[in-house]
Amino acid sequence: MESTRSGPRGLHAVVRTKDGWAVQHAVVTVTDGYGNQVVRTEADAEGAVMTAPLAPGVYTVVVTAVGYSPIASTAIATASGTAELGVLVLARQGGVELPPPGVWTIDPAHSKVAATAQHLGLSSVQGRFTEFAGRIDVGATAETSSVMAEINAASITTGNGTRDDHLRSADFLGVESYPTISYRSIGLSAAGPDRWTLRGDLNMAGITRSVDLDLTYLGTSPDPWGGLRAAFRAVTELHREHFAMNYNQVVQAGISLIGATLKVELDIQAVQGEPPPSS
């Protein structure tokens, strides 16, 4: 028996995540009391499931979706063949729900891109990039999602003009020759209950290297302007020498002025939808 969107209604349900988003790719299988499959159908774009009328009786309904734990429910079809199950909630396997599928645009005004280096082996100096843009394409599952971002290399600031000019020079970022730092993801895989490893290619100072980000999704929330926002945090460690940033000075006792590694921290807010057209 196949599903139908018109005519007399049989089994009716809506498949949602814990956050209330439709699970568009959910598969619903209905079996009778003898274990025979009588219906197998998919949820529509709104997460709704509707079948043709069922023979009166008791049925087992199993809902599955890639990336979610399956659930089973009992449905009772009335004499008219209708069986109402209401909202069926699927929990993502391993942790929090993902934001709704589609394009999300990074909001620089409410995001941070920072890198921290050790100074003299004693303390740290943090630099922030103030100009960047990007988008997150959320797929039906985490594994089908992707990220791309670009940073204006010259927008680096550490709170010290002399140091910032040096970071923009050929000793480090070489912004005159390489004005843009870019990152494009090539894969995403689960690394824990609420964490993923985002694999991608980072191009900086004219050199491209594979860089993995330790990514955490922090949830969604409506904003005061009628939009929906999602928050993410990602961290990684970069080796300066991998990008030919070999400048250093050695002070007394062999201590380096600048550490060999950089801790990169990304605190990202993204707004649902494409960015508005530029004027």
Image (cartoon, grey):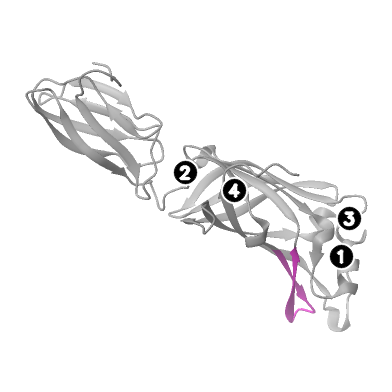
Quadrant where the N terminus sits is: top left
For disc 2, the marked residue is 100
Q: Position of residue 25 (x, y in %)?
A: 40, 32
The residue positioned 22% from the left and 19% from the top of the image is 52
Task: Find numbered disc 3 in the image and state the secondary structure of the residue it sits on.
Answer: loop
Quadrant where the C terminus sits is: top right
Q: Is there any visible trace of residue 276 in the rendered image?
A: yes
Q: Dot 4: few (<14), some (14–19), or many (≥20) neighbours within 10 Å?
A: many
State the mark number for residue 175.
3
Q: Distance between the residues labelled 1 and 2?
A: 39 Å
Task: Find numbered disc 4 in the image and state the secondary structure of the residue it sits on.
Answer: strand
The residue positioned 15% from the left and 21% from the top of the image is 54
Looking at the image, residue 247 lies above or below residue 176: below
Q: Dot 3: few (<14), some (14–19), or many (≥20) neighbours within 10 Å?
A: many
State the mark number for residue 198.
4
Q: Dot 1: few (<14), some (14–19), or many (≥20) neighbours within 10 Å?
A: many
Q: Where is residue 173 in the image (x, y as percent from the top left)?
A: 86, 58
Q: Distance between the residues labelled 1 and 3?
A: 9 Å
**Residue 260: in magenta span:** no
Residue type at tag 1: Leu
Upstream in sequence: badge 4 or badge 2: 2
